[in-house]
Image (spheres, rainbow, N blue to C red):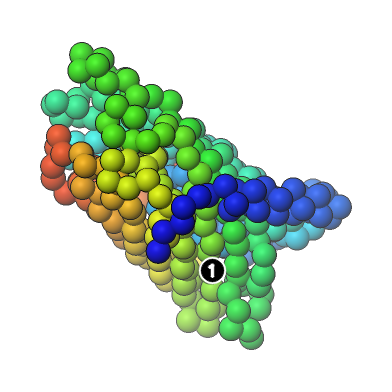
C-alpha cells in the first residue's frame, strides 16, 4: 500500500504531541524510577525507545504516569564494508509522551567507498494513545503508540573526487523526510514474552542515510516491522527483530533488516545490548549482503 503524502500524518502527530505534553505537564513531579526493569526498552538506532532497529509502543525511561525519565545512548554497528554510529538522548514524560534526538554517522571501510562519511540528524516524537503493555494483563488490548521521526541528511563527504556531495546526486528525491509509525506492544508476564508490531509510512532509503524517495519510487509506502523478546530473567532479555524497507533507488537493492539480540539490564540506570544484524545490500558499489555486530550502551534515569 502506498501513501502519496506524509504531510497529514506529520500534522496529526504534531497536534497529538502538543496535547500530550500539555496534559503530562499537569502530572509531572520528580523522577520516580517506578516502572518495571526493562519495560522502557532500549534506544534504537534512530533514537526512539524500543528494540535495536524498530520502535515499540513503550515510552522510554522509568518514569511512571506521575513522573518522567530519560536516557542517553551510544550505538555502533559494524559490517564487512560499513559502519554506523548513533548517539542520542530521549525523554519520557508521564509514561505518555516520548521526545528523542539522535545523530547518525555512516562510514565506509572498503574501496571505492573507504572514505565515505554520511551524517544524519533525527528528531522524534511518540505518543501513547491506548492500553498499557504491563499493567493491563487481563486485557487483550496492547499498548498502542503513534510516532513521527523527522530526518535531515547532512550531505556526503569523501566522494568529492566523484563530484558527489549530496544524496540527491545518487538518485534520491530529497535530503530530508518524515517517517510516521504506529506501534502495538503486548507484554505477557506469565509467559515472559514481549510482542511488538509496527507499521511505518516511509520514503527513507536505508533509514534516510541515502536520502528519501528515488528514481524508482517517490511515494510513501507502508512497511511492517516485528519484534519478539523473551525475558530470560529479570536482568536479561533475548529476542529477534525484522524491519521491512522500501526499494526506491536503482543503485541500492535495498533489503529488509534482521537481528538477533541480547539485552542486559544490571540496573534501571544502565543497559547493554549486543546483536548480530543482517542489513542486506546497501549500495551496488559493494554488492554483498552486509552482516555484522551491533553494540549499544544506554544510561539513564
Tell which residue pokes out farthest to the front in this image.
Answer: 4
Which of 233 and 78 lies nearest the eye of the viewer? 78
Q: What residue does disc 1 label?
A: 184
Would you say residue 213 is visible in this rendering?
A: yes
Q: Is residue 171 left or right of residue 27?
A: left
Q: Residue 223's spot in the image, x, y percent?
A: 39, 60
Residue 190 position within the rendered picture, expressed as x and y whole percent measured from the top left: 53, 82
The answer to whether residue 146 is left or right of residue 235 is right
Give the camera-side residue of 52 and 111.
111
* Residue in the image at 57% along x and 47% along y: 7
| Image spot of residue 140 (x, y percent) | 58, 83
Against 210, is 192 above or below? below
- Residue at 79% in and 58% down: 66
Viewer-closest of 288 and 30: 288
Q: Is 169 rendered above or below residue 209? A: above
> Which residue is the extreme one toward the top?
161
Give the structural element (helix, strand or loop) at label 1.
strand
Which image quarter is the N terminus in? bottom left
At 41% from the left and 69% from the top, the residue drawn is: 228
Q: Which one is nearer the viewer's eye here, 232 or 121? A: 121
**What percent of the width, then of the height, locates residue 30?**
79, 48
Q: How many marks?
A: 1
* Residue 36 relative to residue 168: left or right: right
Residue extending furthest bottom?
Answer: 138
When the figure is inspected, residue 173 is found, relative to residue 227, above or below; the finding is above
| Left or right of 75 on screen, residue 266 | right
Asked whether the viewer can see residue 31, the reply is no
Amino acid at each position: 500500500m502506498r501513501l502519496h503524502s506524509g504531510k497529514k500524518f506529520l500534522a496529526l502527530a504534531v497536534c497529538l504531541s502538543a496535547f500530550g505534553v500539555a496534559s503530562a505537564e499537569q502530572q509531572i513531579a520528580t523522577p520516580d524510577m517506578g516502572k518495571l526493569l526493562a519495560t522502557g526498552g532500549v534506544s534504537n538506532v534512530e533514537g526512539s525507545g524500543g528494540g535495536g532497529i524498530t520502535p515499540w509502543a513503550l515510552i522510554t525511561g522509568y518514569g511512571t504516569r506521575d513522573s518522567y525519565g530519560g536516557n542517553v545512548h551510544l550505538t555502533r554497528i559494524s559490517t564487512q564494508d560499513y559502519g554506523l554510529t548513533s548517539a542520542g538522548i530521549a525523554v519520557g514524560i508521564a509514561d505518555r509522551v516520548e521526545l528523542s534526538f539522535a545523530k547518525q554517522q555512516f562510514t565506509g571501510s572498503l574501496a571505492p567507498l573507504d572514505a565515505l562519511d554520511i551524517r544524519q540528524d533525527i528528531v522524534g516524537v511518540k505518543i501513547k494513545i491506548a492500553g498499557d503493555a504491563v499493567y493491563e494483563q487481563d486485557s487483550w488490548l496492547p499498548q498502542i503508540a503513534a510516532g513521527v521521526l523527522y530526518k535531515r541528511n547532512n550531505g556526503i563527504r569523501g566522494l568529492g573526487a566523484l563530484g558527489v556531495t549530496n544524496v540527491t546526486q545518487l538518485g534520491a528525491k530529497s535530503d530530508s523526510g518524515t517517517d510516521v509509525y504506529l506501534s502495538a506492544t503486548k507484554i505477557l508476564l506469565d509467559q515472559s514474552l514481549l510482542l511488538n508490531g509496527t507499521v511505518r509510512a516511509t520514503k527513507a532509503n536505508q533509514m534516510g542515510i541515502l536520502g528519501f524517495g528515488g528514481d524508482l519510487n517517490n511515494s510513501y509506502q507502508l512497511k511492517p516491522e516485528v519484534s519478539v523478546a523473551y525475558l530470560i530473567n529479570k536482568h536479561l532479555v533475548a529476542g529477534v527483530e525484522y524491519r521491512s524497507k522500501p526499494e526506491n533507488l536503482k543503485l541500492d537493492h535495498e533489503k529488509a533488516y534482521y537481528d538477533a539480540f541480547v539485552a542486559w539490564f544490571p540496573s534501571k540506570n544502565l543497559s547493554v545490548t549486543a546483536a548480530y544484524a543482517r542489513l542486506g545490500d546497501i549500495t551496488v558499489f559493494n554488492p554483498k549482503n552486509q552482516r555484522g555486530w551491533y553494540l549499544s550502551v544506554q544510561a539513564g534515569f
